[in-house]
Amino acid sequence: MLWLIVVTVVALWLAVRRFQRRRILDVASKIKCDIKAYPFIGHAYMFIGGGESRMRTFQILGREAIKNGGLTNLWIGEQYYTVVVDPVDLEVILKTSLEKDDVMRFARNLIGNGTIFAPVSIWRPRRKVLAPTFTPKNLNHFVKIFSRQSIVMTDQMQSVAGTGPVSVWKYLTSYTMDSVCETALGVNVNAQRTVDEPFLTAFEECCKLMAARMVSPWLAADALYKLLPYHASFERCKNTICSFVDKVIKSKRKTMKENDTAINKNSEKDMKTFLELLIEATGGDRGYSDLELQEETLVIVVAGTDTSAVGVSFTVSMLARHPDVQEKVYEELREVFGDSDRPVTFEDLPHLKYLDAVVRETLRLYPPVPVVVRKIEKDVTLPSGITLVEGCGVLVSIWGTQRNPRYWGDDAELFRPERFLDTPLKHPAAFMAFSHGPRNCLGYQYAMMSMKTALATLIRRYRVSSGSSRSNGCKAEEKPIRVTFDVMMKDADKFIVQLDRRKK
């Protein structure tokens, strides 16, 4: 008798749930998906197995959406997502649906309400405060710092040049951390001269734990997660990260007090850092609490360090695999710099057009952030004819969009930088390595300048090569880079190349 009651209760609960979700189920029924979804877990089984498995699943979903004309389905437990790879549909979604999906609460466990993941009500006013950091005057000053820090980076690489294959990841992520902390926070942390920087190690571990939880419905409940060893590891790494940020903030406040220079007394020639603008904002009605200050500082350090490091690292890997492209980059650098060793300047960067195309083509094939998610709070009818209803999630497959043959041609899978020089984009959202719409990356120009400065300094000094490269360049059929997903997409092999000092 008891089993009959249990079965009846479960059946009634399932019937009620189905009725409540009938509109979402109707949307899913109109979108083709040939990938098997199972009761209760949906497609979550595909994400089991670590970062490489997660990224492989996102690639499968992206290709499935391309095959089906731009859309497909994804179920993570009972949560439904429409996977989108068509720029025409994406432009509508990213301009009308600004709220981040609820799955981002796992990232907010680290970042809090920092602008990357904040609700629209918090994001909108904070973005207005942050935007002045990236004025042309500040960017000009930032390049001087990028240039100086990139010289430190190439000096640090000297010890491994000519010694065989080596991972360049630690050199490049330390460079971006030093650059971000000095340009945006006004402090010098000397990460490049520190072995096993604790902040960087802790951040990588946090990303792995967050990524696993985002795609594992069985880890969603906080009460259960706190009983698992993952939670203790996350909290330990989070404390390391937050302690670093608090130290940076206290150091800046102390420096400002010792110099006895209020921000509003700075001369016009002085650059206001990101952190200084936030501290200045605490003086009025727009004031920031200590928690808000920590959240936004975390955003700039975390996002600024990792995304630029991933982008420049993938670019180095692609130059190693394509020596013909690397030679064109080097020749362009010689045209601008000659045989001199002078530092890169702000005025040099606009002349590095081919290098710019190489970076963009790398970001097209290997976007640091391969997917983003949005929440549908109001019904949205897409140009493709599908109406997404309230309660749906949207998985924006940047990886799939930027490999969509409809917008990139039959050679969409090939590395061909010239495509960014030959013809304009077929749609503004076809290339969205820095996202698209009102919530796009505020610091995209900052990131591009940092990456191009580091690459120009590196390639002028070293030739990079890969053991899999051939004398006439990398063949199209050669195996692609093994990638892993830990919130950001990275090389599973840690960006291994060979560095050899160039001869004058």
Image: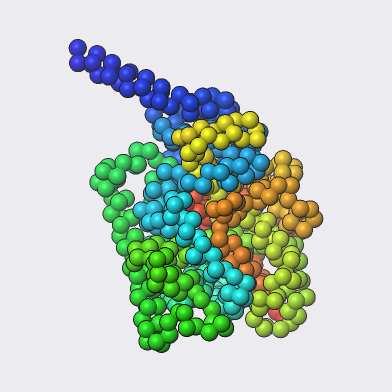
Query: Left or right of 366: which side holds 49?
Result: left
Name the quarter where the N terminus is drawn. top left
Q: Residue at x 25, y 19 (%)?
A: 6
In the displayed structure, 203 sits above or below 6; it is: below
The outermost residue toward the front is 285
Q: Nearer the viewer, residue 164 or 150?
A: 150
- Dividing the picture into quadrants, the one containing residue 271 is bottom right
Q: Is residue 171 visible?
A: no
In the displayed structure, 49 sits above or below 330; it is: above
Query: Left or right of 117: which side holds 151?
Result: right
| Percent x, y of residue 247 | 35, 73
Q: Is residue 104 visible?
A: yes
Q: Residue at x 64, y 81 (%)?
A: 343
| Percent x, y of residue 118 | 43, 53
- Dividing the picture into quadrants, the one containing residue 151 is bottom right
Q: Nearer the viewer, residue 78 or 493?
A: 78
Q: Residue at x 71, y 47 (%)?
A: 427
| Percent x, y of residue 326 | 71, 65
